[in-house]
Amino acid sequence: MTATSAFVTSLLTSFAIFCGLVLAFCILSKWKINHNIYYSSRMLAGIGPTRSAKQRNPFAWMKEAIMTPEAELVRIAGLDAAIYVNFFAAVLEIFSYSALFCIPVLIPIAVTSNHNAVAFKLDPNQTYEGFDNLAMGNVEEGTTKLWAFLLGTYWVSCVTYYVLVKHYKKMIHLRGKEQAHEKATPQQFACLIRDIPAPPKHMSRAQQVNAFFRKIHPDSYETCLIVTNVKKLMKLWGKYQATKKKLERAEAVYEQSKTTEKPEGTRPLHKKGFLGLFGAKVDSINFYVELVKDLALLVEAERQRTLKEEELPAAFVFFNNRKAAAEASQAVHAPYAMQWQVFPAPEPREVEWNNLAKTVHVRLVRQGLVYFAVFMTVVFYMIPIALISSLTTLDNLVKILPFLKIIVNYPPINTVLQAFLPQLALIVFMSLLPSLLMAFSRMEGIPSKSHLVRAASGKYFYFIVFNVFLGVTLFGTIFSSLAGFKELLNSSKFSISSVVTLFGSKLPPVAAYFITYVALQFFVGYGLELSRVIPLVVYHLKKRFLCKTEKELEEAWAPGPFTYETLVPADILILMISMAYSVIAPIILLFAILYYAIGYVVLRNQALNVYVPDFESGGRMWPHIHARIVVALFIGQITMMGYFGIKKFPYAVLVLILPLFTIFFASMCKMNYYPSFQVTSLAIASEDCKESPPLRKVVEAYTPECLLSEEAVYEDSDKFEDAASSIGSRSVSRSDSEIHNSNNTEDLYAL
Amino acid sequence: MTATSAFVTSLLTSFAIFCGLVLAFCILSKWKINHNIYYSSRMLAGIGPTRSAKQRNPFAWMKEAIMTPEAELVRIAGLDAAIYVNFFAAVLEIFSYSALFCIPVLIPIAVTSNHNAVAFKLDPNQTYEGFDNLAMGNVEEGTTKLWAFLLGTYWVSCVTYYVLVKHYKKMIHLRGKEQAHEKATPQQFACLIRDIPAPPKHMSRAQQVNAFFRKIHPDSYETCLIVTNVKKLMKLWGKYQATKKKLERAEAVYEQSKTTEKPEGTRPLHKKGFLGLFGAKVDSINFYVELVKDLALLVEAERQRTLKEEELPAAFVFFNNRKAAAEASQAVHAPYAMQWQVFPAPEPREVEWNNLAKTVHVRLVRQGLVYFAVFMTVVFYMIPIALISSLTTLDNLVKILPFLKIIVNYPPINTVLQAFLPQLALIVFMSLLPSLLMAFSRMEGIPSKSHLVRAASGKYFYFIVFNVFLGVTLFGTIFSSLAGFKELLNSSKFSISSVVTLFGSKLPPVAAYFITYVALQFFVGYGLELSRVIPLVVYHLKKRFLCKTEKELEEAWAPGPFTYETLVPADILILMISMAYSVIAPIILLFAILYYAIGYVVLRNQALNVYVPDFESGGRMWPHIHARIVVALFIGQITMMGYFGIKKFPYAVLVLILPLFTIFFASMCKMNYYPSFQVTSLAIASEDCKESPPLRKVVEAYTPECLLSEEAVYEDSDKFEDAASSIGSRSVSRSDSEIHNSNNTEDLYAL
């Protein structure tokens, strides 16, 4: 079997899997019992499945996914998801325009050349595939035909610049429209203050913050909320919530046991000891009722202590209009800029409470350490995998566990295991990686979850660029052995020019590998994504055997948000591969277009019907994606330089202009467009705002859930004053002398 | 004559010159006719020379220069000069602390070693000087003695970090105090707006700007001043001013000709034609009176046209309080951040009118081109110099001009000419360089003169680092021939590790050269600076032969400002050299301390008594200097790494931590301290301000001189309305409908 036929086989196989999964989706999504899985976000919103679910046409969902207008998408899925889907549209545009030139011009030139055939005649050891004749590798060295490929490089670059600018402007417009929305959100009135210096002796933190901001913003500053250390309280609160859930479950079990034959039911019992396996049997309901009561008291006591004793040098400050908050968040406040650092407040749901109070020096040191750790992870993560893979061969396994011999000797099983075992370590380690990178990012002291996601996505991007793209390119084969890594690490001649040459020389032979990779990614990946086979099975199993209460059932099908931290780097890897090969082997553009086109439809469907965002970052993922597209373009241009050099094209030096211009383009975009995503512009913040949340609601939104007491803390609820109001009054009562009229505030909002 | 004795000779010679010049200063500065030169700034302020000028003690000026308190220095010389002098104090502190360890510990270790003697025995071709025994080169390879030098490297680095942080804080404090000064300056109420989009059809630019800012800052925005293209007007205005000067001169000549013998005097005459050499003779006074009248009319007509037709997409906007202006200058205003870019307004005197309206894209492109041009200049500037030097040898000269033979053959003249001729091209080209770099910086589109100075200083820094420091280091000798450059350019093995090795191996042999360089710089340089021999001679010559009017006389002794663009890079070069050698040849520290100590005293004296700043940038030179000190430290650490490697010290790897930490330190300082210099913090801007200029004065300050009509435009003065008020009313009258009460404004200021 030649490489070409292997390629076609693998392509056809993935396509068959894809068709099967899409078919499964078309059928399964019509069944009512599956609506919770295929229309999760709509079910949560209580609006039921879309019209297409009731239509006969199995592809109606596609039309619906594509035709839903942009504004509707933003309204339903949020700006973050809309921008993610738009990223697919942008890349689709880049590759479509690129293909307009590369496929009809470059492929015929390659096919009509015969460098490969000549090389084969000269040295029959050199093998080439039919597929290779479609690529630049088949063009003779130093001929004028290479001008077409040079033109192709310029074409792809210019198209990318154009589309990127166009879409950046579109994204800014989308974000601006959301920010200027007449219905204001709490974060538009708040700023996050970090690095508050130690208060003077006679002042509390709240007094200090109030005094500082009242002096600077006498007309617009309202009040502050000091950040407290809620770690201990959070732990207790978690225990309290878990116990309440157990109580509900026990009650549900008791209700269900009341059948017509036995109307009094059976009160559930459980053992008190470890894992419910040891100890005395107790009545579950009575036991949990008591426990909940005790925990409620403990939580309340801890809450009071936290508010009093656990204040940290960070705070949220609140303003009476959007413009004042937007303006304050952009200005240096303290004479020493490292004190009183002001940031735009993250959305309340995405606040990382434990990171807020980390001081600037702690953040810097942690950042340094995390960067170092990430560098080590990126470079050396493959080593333990390779080691374990080499240890867990079938032969080794049989030596340790001789009884496996009988199974192993059966040929079909043997083949499967031989192929699968070395991958086992890879799969396990790779599935651990995103959480590890999230943990690393969290350690940096990042204050919001969306920023965490971006930081983790950036780290994952480095990882896959280094290990997949560079790994495959430089060593010809991925995850093969330690040898490749050793070569890289030992190479004392590692220099920029040698990397460029390597890029050029090693890239083309692996083009087929990458095309297979892209095809597999989109056929199998999107098939699984759309059909949601795994969540479906898990849901039905849980529903059948585990879930007792309504809440538990909802948790079983809750879709969660898009996991951008793994999705974005994977998409950009495909982009990077396709961009690097777009001129060398233009056929890859067809697969790239398919990947992004199918992705666009599938993800638009998922955004509209399935996933529910945990929080909104206001589309701040876009500059992150944009920068990485530019990096991909840059790597592609460097690759082309190297490859033109190998093809002995004397005008290859003309390509040099492109990477230089790309650097210029990147800095231009950063200067001109990035600020629009970093902050809220004053023109937007000054737009009329018809519906603002009252101050109390804003402050409440920024109070961690465990610091708010609930409506019903069982019998003792009236014993405690309402925590929210206590926080409101706290900052006010502690504020220096000035009397604070909250009615007045709400009047101002209404303006 | 050995190198050591040559070194001592050159040192003693320079010291003798220094003593002579200081003595000259001590004597000459007491003479009343020289007070304009030695106490220029005080004479301009009308307060006469300092007390020390009248004291007998010739060194009283020193005490005075040192003892004058910081606040006094800031008041008299401005913040920029105070910060420049403080930079000397900071470096002095770094080197003094460094010397505390390096001189008493490292020199004895070096002296008691005998690597040089052993090497000389083994290979008598290797020469070494007595001086070399004081340096690390004399320590045996791989011995434990090297630990002391490692410790020395850490000591110097830590001392530098400590002093830099301490002084950054001090500088921030100084700047903050100036900015919070109760007497407000015009720039504190203004912002510069660039990249204003095209106005809608029915609106003028002023209306557009007013509408935009009134909406965002309804309470604090006052008015705007649209920037106009004054190039043509400026040319006419210059001609007008020059003619007025000529008229004054003619009048003065006429007055002086009225002696007692001839009370009617002689009316001066001149020829109308080219250079006053051809054409008909005319009566100068009558001729210039007519010309001034004509030009005044032309200027006025052009002024009216400029105001109407030459509006540009940039403006100054004015606020009614300091905090509002400071806050606005830090915020993104437009939804698309590249439009309506807001910057803190530069001081009125330092505005670069022709650069204000350059749009962001023009600025970016120009910046790219200028960076490229500077790169070429830095790398290739020495080639024409070397070429011309090689052509203008004495032999060549004699071939061309044979009549010189007689002079040239006289031995002493021959020697001097031999030494001097090759330097001639160097001197001419080097004196052109600062103006060239200023022109480059101006092309970038920088809006203020102080920024221009910083940009030119940065470029000059690259130049001297590359050509002096690296040039000497890598090729052993400066400005020698083309060979060195060829070697650099042809070297295909140019890599980071080879540079590090070269640094280490080539540095020590040139230590003596650099010490001579430092000594020459401070002895001769500061001697000339203090004694002001050249300005003194020029002044007295001009006074005697050229100056007729009082104005001309003042121009003859006008001291001008410090030329930071050449001073700062030269000082930092000395710092860089000393830092690189501080551990390798600690004796250099003594010279560095002398350089900065003498510099501190001399420049403090000059700042207090001589130089008059053209403008104030609020000390923004400091972050620029700070960054370059950090770069110097970084280069020093890299040098040490290389040198430890050569000394075969196995723990050299420990030095690696230092450059990494330096990068961290630099980013930390940039993040934490730089914003305090970039903007005005709100806490400072909110300080009470007791004395504010009225709005009219602020707007007037930002109107180019040529756009303001004068009090007396000869007879026709009442024909033109007052230009200042016309500008004030212009922006007001064009503002959309809203009536603007300027009394109200001044009430607000008085708050």
Image: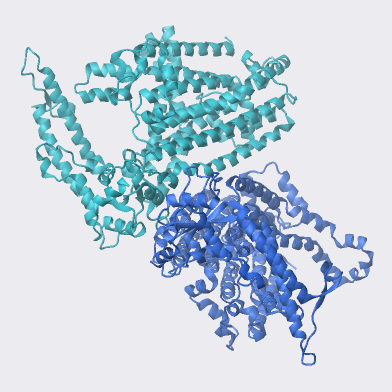
Chain colours: A blue, B cyan
Q: Residue at x 55, y 68 (%)?
A: A81
Q: Nearer the viewer, residue B44 or A672?
A: B44
The location of residue A468, given as percent across then percent down, is: 68, 58
The location of residue A336, given as percent across then percent down, is: 50, 42
Q: What is the quadrant of residue A722 in the picture?
A: bottom right
Q: Is residue A327 above or below residue B603?
A: below
**Could one spot residue B333 in this view of the protein?**
yes
Q: What is the quadrant of residue B281 in the picture?
A: top left
The location of residue A643, given as percent across then percent down, is: 59, 53
Q: Is residue B373 left or right of residue A600?
A: left
Question: Looking at this rendering, what residue extends furthest in the front direction?
Answer: A719
Q: Is residue A669 left or right of residue A391?
A: left
Q: Is residue A328 above or below residue A498?
A: below
Q: Is residue A129 above or below residue A646?
A: below
Q: Nearer the viewer, residue B17 or B56?
A: B56
Q: Is residue A459 left or right of residue A88?
A: right
The location of residue B387, given as percent across then percent down, is: 45, 27
**Could one spot residue A647 in this view of the protein?**
no
Which quadrant of the rendered structure holds the N terminus of chain B? top right
Q: Residue at x 37, y 16 (%)?
A: B52
Q: Residue at x 22, y 21 (%)?
A: B547
Q: Nearer the viewer, residue A3 or B530?
A: B530
Q: How many marks?
A: 0
